[in-house]
Image (tube, rainbow, N blue to C red):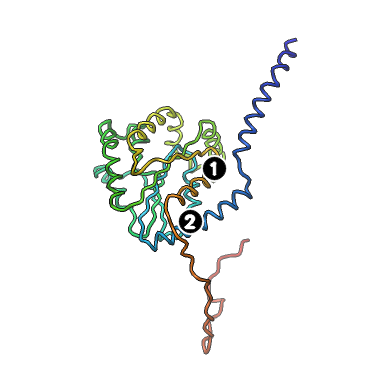
């Protein structure tokens, strides 16, 4: 009888699991649809790049969020087809002993864009509101001062003509756990999982509190936070690129079709033999 009761209870559990699976499947996107949409968006990113260069715009895009929420993947897809002379990524290591004595924002200021550039910060000055606060790398006074001065710092950037865009990548507890496990067992992704990431995992609630306090002080009209649902990586990448393109009005500056000129003829010049050169071994 006990087994029969257990069997009667299972259909409801199965139904709930199926409902959850169906909800997740609605959120997924096929590789074909993803690649097609990404290709179109990357063409638009190239157009935006040319407009930034032509107009001398100064663009800063800040990427923050939970560990393994998909910031790096989104940045990689944005920069994939862009010129590193126009679009560059800044991912600073821990401050040196000298940098730790500077004005807090000083080491970030030197990486801000000049005219015709777009800079993407993979983590930024918001380290003080997140990891430094939670891990005790800064004092309570330093944290409080950051929350007071950061909005003014960003308003100053905007007044100087910089277009400042801030993204927060969010990921649910279960999905972060799944991605951490994948990194642990994947030899090419193991480097992504640092001791600090593991510590942040154990302090999930503390990071949530720090993030909420940060938003309360720095979600300002001149530079609002835009939250990206990162539970489905492919959708998150497409959504953030689409949104980025919508924030900057640009025109298509695609040049006229290019015709290659004829190659110069080799008249009276004898090239040295190939045997004089050292080639890479053809292993494949």
Q: What residue is drawn where x is 46% and y is 64%?
A: 253
Q: What element carries label 2?
A: helix
Mark pair 2, 1: CA separation: 19 Å
* Above or below: residue 87 compared with residue 175: below
Q: What residue is drawn where x is 37% and y is 45%?
A: 93
Q: Is residue 207 left or right of residue 150?
A: right
- Front residue of this view, candidates 201 and 193: 201
Q: Is mark 1 on a helix, strand or loop?
A: helix
Give the label, 2 or 1, closer to the camera: 2
Q: In which quarter of the image is the N terminus?
A: top right
Residue at the top extreme of this rendering: 1
* Above or below: residue 26 compared with residue 279: above
Using the rendered view, name the quadrant where residue 57 is placed.
bottom left
Mark 1 neighbour density, 10 Å: few (under 14) some (14–19) many (20 or more): some
* Above or below: residue 171 compared with residue 45: above
The residue tagged 2 is 45
Query: x%, y% of residue 166?
Result: 39, 44
Q: In this view, does 109 lie to the left or right of 264?
A: left
The residue tagged 1 is 233
Query: x%, y% of residue 218?
Result: 33, 38
Mark 2 neighbour density, 10 Å: few (under 14) some (14–19) many (20 or more): many
Q: In this view, does 8 lie to the left or right of 256?
A: right
* Above or below: residue 245 compared with residue 185: below
- Front residue of this view, candidates 20 and 204: 20
Q: Quadrant of the C terminus?
A: bottom right
Q: Is residue 175 left or right of residue 64?
A: right
């Amino acid at each position: 009888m006990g087994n029969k009761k257990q069997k009667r209870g299972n259909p409801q559990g199965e139904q709930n699991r199926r409902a959850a699976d169906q909800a997740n499947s609605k959120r997924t996107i096929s590789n074909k649809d993803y690649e097609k949409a990404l290709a179109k968006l990357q063409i638009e990113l190239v157009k935006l790049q040319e407009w930034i260069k032509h107009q001398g715009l100064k663009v800063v895009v800040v990427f923050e969020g939970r560990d393994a929420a998909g910031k790096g993947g989104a940045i990689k897809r944005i920069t994939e087809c862009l010129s590193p002379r126009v679009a560059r990524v800044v991912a600073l290591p821990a401050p040196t002993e000298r940098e730790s004595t500077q004005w807090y924002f000083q080491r970030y200021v030197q990486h801000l864009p000049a005219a015709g550039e777009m800079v993407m910060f993979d983590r930024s000055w918001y380290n003080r509101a997140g990891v430094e606060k939670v891990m005790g790398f800064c004092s309570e006074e330093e944290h409080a001062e950051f929350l007071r001065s950061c909005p003014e710092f960003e308003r100053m950037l905007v007044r100087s003509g910089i277009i400042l865009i801030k993204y927060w990548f969010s990921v649910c507890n279960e999905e972060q756990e799944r991605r951490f496990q994948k990194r642990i067992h994947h030899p090419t992704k193991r480097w992504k999982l640092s001791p600090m990431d593991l510590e942040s995992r154990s302090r999930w609630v503390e990071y949530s509190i720090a993030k909420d306090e940060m938003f309360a002080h720095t979600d300002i009209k001149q530079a609002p936070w835009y939250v990206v649902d990162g539970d489905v990586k492919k959708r998150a990448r497409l959504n953030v690129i689409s949104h980025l393109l919508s924030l900057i009005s640009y025109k298509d500056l695609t040049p006229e079709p290019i015709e290659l000129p004829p190659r110069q003829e080799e008249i009276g010049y004898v090239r040295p033999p190939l045997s004089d050169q050292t080639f890479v071994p053809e292993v494949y």
